[in-house]
Image: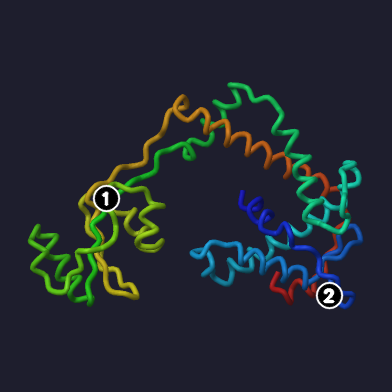
Amino acid sequence: QRQMCIRDSLLGADPIPDEQAKTLVWVNGSAITSEQLEHAFTQFKTSQQPNQKNSQHDESQDNKELVLNMLIDEELLVQGANKLNLPRNDPNNRKVIIRSVISHITEQAQQAAISEQQLQQFYQENKTIFQQPKRLQLKVLRFATQQQAEKARQVLLNAGDISTIESIDLNHQLPNAVLPAHVIRRYIGPAMTKKALLLEQNQISEPIAQADGVYLLQAVIVQTAQQLSFDKVREQVTVQLQRHLRDTSLQTHIEALRQKASISYNGKLLNNEGL
């Protein structure tokens, strides 16, 4: 699934012609250069969500390796376009060719009939997809200092009146309602949401230092994740299975192309790239 998302972000990473470019990989004699990789990797990073951009170095290098593999896959798809007898209005437009090849391959999977047994099996094997996620109603309190937050936490633990605590901010923007994690994240960010999801009902977090103050989180209501019945999510199961079959058919096609291809790597240059 992740590779499919990356491939979508790279559709348009047309090769950069440069006779002097250093070649990282040869795919059936066609070169993939370090310049092409940097260009595609820049596109990939630009396509990421804002909260995904602060990745560690190792994760960044893993992503770069994924992007390189996507470039190899795309080169194989472009080379295989002629064998599929697909229309090529502009042979130089890789984006159009790749989309055409992918559509041709996945269309066959899309048209295949899906049995009731397949739906039931997919539902049983992927039950976590078909859940109502955990939901919370949070009380979010902000303080100017760590000391104030710790004092307020003790008051809360002793069921005291927190309105007596100095410099407390009770006017946070989070709605007074039971909300799923993805909505809570919009208000308090991914880091505090992750901590909030670990709270049991009525539990109070330790003080959480943020750039704009020190926070306490209290889980007022906790609704655990609930498994939805097959009958209730049948349409959703069908959509997810069709997507799975499309992705699988494309991956199977690419793996077959790789097995037949001659792929040579420039080990020294790849090491310089940290790959």
- Given residues 265 and 192, the one toward you in this image is 192
Which SS class for mark 1?
Answer: strand
Q: Residue furthest front?
A: 89
Q: Residue at x 59, y 22 (%)?
A: 117
Please tell me which residue lies in front, 151 or 106: 106
The mark found on residue 137 in the picture is: 1
Tell me what residue is drawn at x 40 percent, y 39 percent.
132
The residue under the point 18% across, 70% down is 150
Q: Work out whether mark 2 precedes mark 1 in sequence or the reverse, and give the earlier one.
A: 2
Numbered mark located on residue 175 in the image: none
Q: Position of residue 207 (x, y in %)?
A: 25, 68
Q: Nearer the viewer, residue 82 or 2?
A: 82
Amino acid type, residue under disc 1 in the picture: Gln
- State the image coordinates of residue 108 (x, y, percent, origin top left): 75, 33
Circles 2 and 1 in contact, beta carbons < 8 Å: no
Q: Position of residue 121 (x, y in %)?
A: 56, 28
Instruction: Name the residue furthest top.
Output: 116
Local secondary structure at mark 2: loop
Mark 2 or mark 1: which is in front? 1
Q: How crowded is the residue under tag 2: few (<14 C-alpha within 10 Å), some, or many (20+)?
A: some
Location of residue 32 with respect to 7 vertically, above or below:
below
The total number of labels drawn is 2
Say what amino acid the circle numbered 2 marks: Lys
Report whether 170 appears left or right of 84: left
Residue 175, x across and y down, in percent = 28, 54
> Which of the 4 image quadrants contains residue 239?
top right
Quadrant holding the C terminus: bottom right
Quarter of the image where one finds residue 242? top right
Above or below, comparing residue 119 to residue 208 in the picture = above
Q: Residue at x 74, y 68 (%)?
A: 37
Q: Which residue is mark 2?
A: 22
Question: CA–CA distance between discs 2 and 1?
Answer: 55 Å
